[in-house]
Image: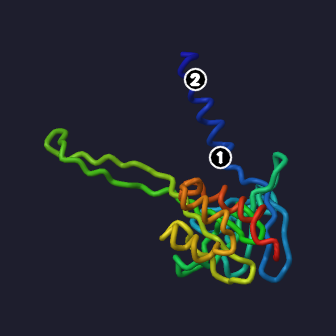
Amino acid sequence: MKKSILPFFIFLCLNILKAQHREVVVFFNDSTSLDGFGEVKNDKIYFKLEQKDKPTVFDYNSVHAIHFVGYGFIEKYEYVKSDKYKKPKIMELIEKGKVNLYAFSEIRTIDNYSSNQVNGFPVSNYKTKLIVEYFIKFPTNEIAIDIVFSFKKRVLRYFSDCPELIEKVNNKTFTKSTIPEMIYFYNDYCNDEF
């Protein structure tokens, strides 16, 4: 009996912890900010002043950023207009510098329909997959650019001022899977005119 209680207790604790909003600072479009507790779901910010309060829902019409604080570090998220989506999406600010790097993450469910049958019915295998898309934004631009789409072409277009970076892309030191490292390199070693 004790063995069956322990997994249930762990499951219960994890659900309670998950239900708790994290400490945040919400930055409004009118340059004010509020400290409280919050979370992000479906490009909306759910904010509470106290854990016991009901959440207030915000979107890009009133908020431009949310910072999750605690545990000795800050996760910064901003509403960003991009060349890929009609409406601003909430994206994590990965790197700030001569060029800013944003990551848009979402979990997608994929139906792997199978011709196998169980009791005469077709079987569907649903898989969830974390998709991360990277966007770059120069401080003078209002729109972030999807850097993954036509990766090499866009790197040549937007980073032509850094021959070292172009060389690293050509010799495959930097690829789609190493975009954050590429942006760190650019901000640290290229275009000191900024």
SS class of the residue under badge 2? helix
Along the line of sight, the residue nearer the viewer: 2 or 107? 107
Q: Is residue 173 above or below residue 162?
A: above
Q: Which quarter shows the C terminus?
A: bottom right
Secondary element under disc 1, as helix, strand or loop, is helix
Looking at the picture, tell me which residue is in the foreground, 34 or 68: 68
Q: Which residue is mark 1?
A: 18
Q: Position of residue 181 (x, y in %)?
A: 66, 55
Q: Is residue 2 above or below residue 10?
A: above
Residue 109 quadrant = bottom left
Determine the residue positioned at 81% across, 51% down: 73
Residue highlighted by disc 2: 5
3D distance between C-alphas at marks 1 and 2: 20 Å
Amino acid marked by disc 1:
Lys
Estimate the x, y position of residue 98 in percent, counting from the top left.
76, 71
Is 115 rendered above or below residue 48?
Answer: above
